[in-house]
Amino acid sequence: MKMRVEIWSDIVCPFCYLGKRKFEAALAEFAQRDNIEVEYKSFQLMPDAVTDTALRVDEYLSKAKGMPIEQARAMNARVTQAAAEVGLDYHLDKAILANTFNAHALLHHAKQYGKQSAMKERLLKAYFTEGLNVDDRATLVRLATEVGLDPTQTERVLAQRTYADAIRADIDLAHSFGCNGVPFFVFDRAYAVSGAQDSRIFLETLRQAYAEFERKE
């Protein structure tokens, strides 16, 4: 039996991609990594966002935070540098403001076929590196096809909003844990780590949680 690590995150959250890489680095060092099951959970930082292909992230930050556009660009530059330090290639100047509900539905769909991890990585790269619209249905179907999902079935799932209840349940569960921001990592429902922490923190938490998990077995 494997120990489960649940990760709440959002597709358009730059720290979620950072946290994913740092957790993966820790997992690679963890001796019992083959006994860890990772599950991605839905969370929306901007649930009411209206997808706008003409609005860029720096412009959104400037308006939402009431800051000069230069300050928003400086913030994006800092997070881009942090991403580069863990091997990620951010192009936030190309990122499109998008509602992520459909992308989360795609992740739930991919989970049914053992492809959730690959789908998560593909969506994050699409948003942060390629500047793709992760709310566009045709784009999502294409990305799903790239990781091996059936395009016709994917189109149907998105059109019918098949996983709407599952997405809301994930978000409600996060709130019940006191999580109001992401990334948020839960280890065997016993330990939690909030934020894109150093990989050493993830590794130590893995070790502690797994030691308790083994004692329960």
Image (cartoon, rainbow, N blue to C red):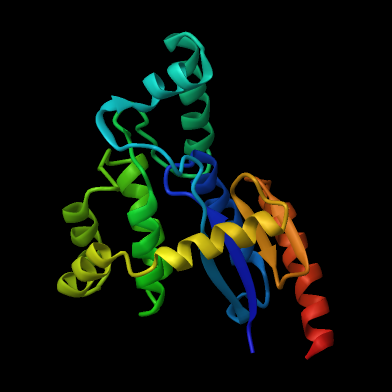
- Write the residue at 29% across / 48% down: 134
Q: How many marks?
A: 0
Please state if 88 lies on the left or on the right of 32 as rendered: left
Q: Nearer the viewer, residue 81 or 155?
A: 155
Q: Position of residue 89 (x, y in %)?
A: 39, 39
Look at the image and tell me in which quarter the C terminus lies.
Answer: bottom right
Say which residue appears at 42% left-offset and 11% top-offset.
69
Q: Which residue lies at the image location 58% right of the left edge and 60% below the top edge?
A: 7
The image position of residue 216, as x and y in percent, is 82, 87
Asked where in the image residue 208 lies, by quadrant, the reply is bottom right
Where residue 97 sits in the image (x, y, percent)? 34, 34
- Front-lying residue, 170 or 150: 170
Residue 156: x percent and y percent? 20, 70
| Quarter holding residue 162 | bottom left
Residue at position x 48%, y 49% from top? Answer: 10
Task: Using the image as rendered, state which of residue 77 and residue 56 is in the foreground.
Answer: 56
Residue 173 seen in this snapshot: yes
| Observer able to see residue 24 | no
Q: Quadrant of the N terminus?
A: bottom right
**7 is higher (above) or lower (below) than 132:** below
Q: Is residue 22 left or right of residue 100?
A: right
Does residue 160 sit above or below 69 in this rendering?
below
Q: Is residue 11 above or below residue 185?
A: above
